[in-house]
Image (cartoon, coloured by chain):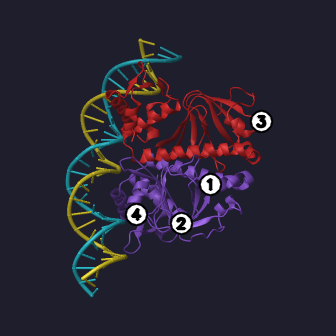
Chain colours: A red, B purple, C yellow, D cyan
Amino acid sequence: MLVRTNGANRRPIDGHLAAVAGDRAFCSEFKYRRGTEIFGEDEDAEYVYQISSGAVRTSKMLPDGRRQINSFHLPGDMFGFENGATHRFTAEAIIETVVSITRRCNVVGAMTNREKDAMNLFGFVTQNLAHAENHMLLLGRKTALEKVAAFLLEMDERQSHPNILILPMNRRDIGDYLGLTLETVSRAFSTLRDVQLLRFDGATQRRVKLLDLEGLVLRSA
Amino acid sequence: MLVRTNGANRRPIDGHLAAVAGDRAFCSEFKYRRGTEIFGEDEDAEYVYQISSGAVRTSKMLPDGRRQINSFHLPGDMFGFENGATHRFTAEAIIETVVSITRRCNVVGAMTNREKDAMNLFGFVTQNLAHAENHMLLLGRKTALEKVAAFLLEMDERQSHPNILILPMNRRDIGDYLGLTLETVSRAFSTLRDVQLLRFDGATQRRVKLLDLEGLVLRSA
DNA sequence: CGCGTGCTTGACCTAGCTCAAACCCAGTGG
DNA sequence: CCACTGGGTTTGAGCTAGGTCAAGCACGCG
């Protein structure tokens, strides 16, 4: 499923991944088309990934097709750490996405050589863990409206409070992230619109203006 | 809430925590009574913990009291890694529990000195992360019966398939772990008993014999 | 223009929640 | 010894949040 766009264009890039891998460890950039798989559950885990642009969903699936999205990754985010030899989940590009990739062994090599940056990597993992812990609280104990409000606040936060929040994912993805159906997500959006907590920008439903962050926080727990 | 039982009895102990902390970093053992708090959400994170005996639940709470248990920790498990300065969740002893404790700074010091053990610690964190990812799938997408079946299999696995599975936690804890009410958990136990997948050992409902692991696996997804 | 994808909305249904009652120990005190 | 108490658990009877199924609209694209 790899769609390599810039061929043998191997070069060090800016950002943490390059720092962790070290100057001598080169990173490649890959481009993935909307909807394509970056890696699949149980595939060999050879690389660690950092997003340059675009958006990625990581998910797990039950045999009958029920899906749970663990997290959405936006530019700057790292994913794909594995303890064992294989990936524990699937990663797919939601929109056209560019990631930089370095071999696991480079990172491990870096850890033994440069402890400070190894600590950085450790930080990325505990960050992922912290997100998972918050998300378990959401999945296990929040109502549909609280889930969607929390989701909007999370996205707003991660896009550093833009004037207009742009959602790269569709309602089904949001539902699979929040443990809801797409219809319930849609109804929650409508409810939040009706009580003036958000407004859709233009005709599209992917561009949202949050009108009252305080109000959203109140409804997110 | 600390109930220090062995006073100034500081000594190195066996196990990973001692290995990570290094020979010169001494670990203390603490005993907690059933139901007592080991650390609270937002408290300073000064230590890393490993269980010698007993059982611990780690949980997060919403303002109105709804609780989500992230995981149960059994002997050998480590918990309490933090990236920042404070704990992201509460840890409580479910039954009388002995933990060994080392200061975070000892562990960090060990990481810069002994890369191999640092890798071990990294492994513990990614292990916690892997558990969280599986648990999100469970919380977001499984039915009550699937959740309880998966829970029983998890506990059985972690007690290395004992003849009789002993549950240290009550039905409410199980419910808060699985995102269910205690009544629903109880009904699921009864259903599994009725279809001969488990039997209660004696009069107590905390001692369970799993009669058909295959059957449980089938119902756990 | 026709088609496919995504979104909304409505009507209905059901898994799991709430509320309530009853039981079963284990521990305590008379 | 028994009575009493208080967790913990089970079970039942209803209720409701959210799922399911279905229709219809809006947009973008070949």
Residue mark closest to the camera, 4 vs 2: 4
Reading the image, the residue beneath label 4 is B170
Q: Are marks 4 and 2 in contact (CB under 8 Å)?
A: no
Instruction: Give the residue at the far front of this rendering.
Output: B8
Measure the alpha-carbon separation of dots 4 and 1. 32 Å
Reading the image, the residue beneath label 3 is A23
| Residue count near mark 4 (Cα–Cα under 10 Å), binned few <14, some 14–19, many ≥20 | few
Decide: is B35 above or below D25: below
* Residue A63 can be seen, yes or no: no
Secondary structure category for the residue under label 3: loop
Reading the image, the residue beneath label 2 is B159
| Residue count near mark 2 (Cα–Cα under 10 Å), binned few <14, some 14–19, many ≥20 | some
Reading the image, the residue beneath label 1 is B104
Residue type marked 3: Asp
Residue A45 falls in which quadrant of the image? Answer: top right
Q: Are marks 1 and 2 in contact (CB under 8 Å)?
A: no
Residue mark closest to the camera, 4 vs 1: 1
> Residue B82 placed where, x, y %?
57, 49
Secondary structure category for the residue under label 1: helix
* Residue A116 can be seen, yes or no: yes
